[in-house]
Amino acid sequence: MPEGVPANESLVAYLTGVKDGVVKSPEWAEKITHVPAQTIRQLARDYANTKPAALIQGWGPQRHNCGERTARR
């Protein structure tokens, strides 16, 4: 959950925009990440259909300015 979201907020409620009216869709993420929405969808499908699966970030992100934010809770 992003910073500022109450600890007791439901992930589904956050993603569907129950309180803020902003649905966190692949199109929403595309504007922030510049990764095409179709690519985001395909990555989600690939990850959901791969068993077992793991996302491992490695050391690279944290070796940049404010990189520790990548792995924060």
Image (spheres, helix red, strand yellow):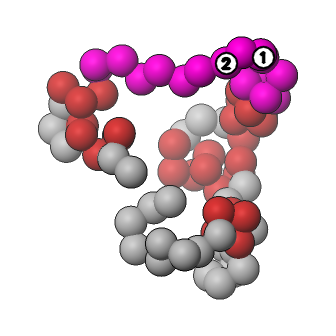
- Hey, which quadrant is residue 43 in on the image? top right
Q: Secondary structure at mark 2?
A: loop
Position of residue 8 measured from the top left corner of the image (x, y, whole percent):
54, 75
Q: Residues within 10 Å of mark 1 (few under 14, many from 20)?
A: few
Magenta residues span 45-60
Q: Residue at the location (59% across, 21% down)? A: 54
Whether residue 14 is situated above or below residue 56 in the rendered picture: below
| Residue type pointed to by label 1 | Thr
Any mark on residue 32, and which? none
Q: Secondary structure at mark 1?
A: loop
Q: Residues within 10 Å of mark 2 (few under 14, many from 20)?
A: few
70 in the magenta segment = no
| Residue type pointed to by label 2 | Ala
Q: Residue at the location (54% across, 24% down)? A: 55
Position of residue 21 measured from the top left corner of the image (x, y, whole percent):
69, 80
- Residue that mark 1 sits on: 50
Viewer-side residue, 49 vs 7? 7
Viewer-side residue, 20 vs 4? 4
* Contact? badges 2 and 1 (CB < 8 Å): yes
Q: Is residue 5 left or right of residue 60?
A: right
The secondary structure making up most of the magenta span is loop
Query: How many numbered badges does the structure rendering display?
Result: 2
Position of residue 26 measured from the top left corner of the image (x, y, whole percent):
71, 48
Viewer-side residue, 50 vs 20? 50
- Residue that mark 2 sits on: 53
- Hey, which quadrant is residue 10 in on the image? bottom right
Whether residue 68 is situated above or below residue 18 in the rendered picture: above
Q: Residue furthest bottom?
A: 19
Q: Residue at the location (36% across, 18% down)? A: 58
Residue 42: tell me if it is visible: no
- Hey, which quadrant is residue 65 in on the image? top left
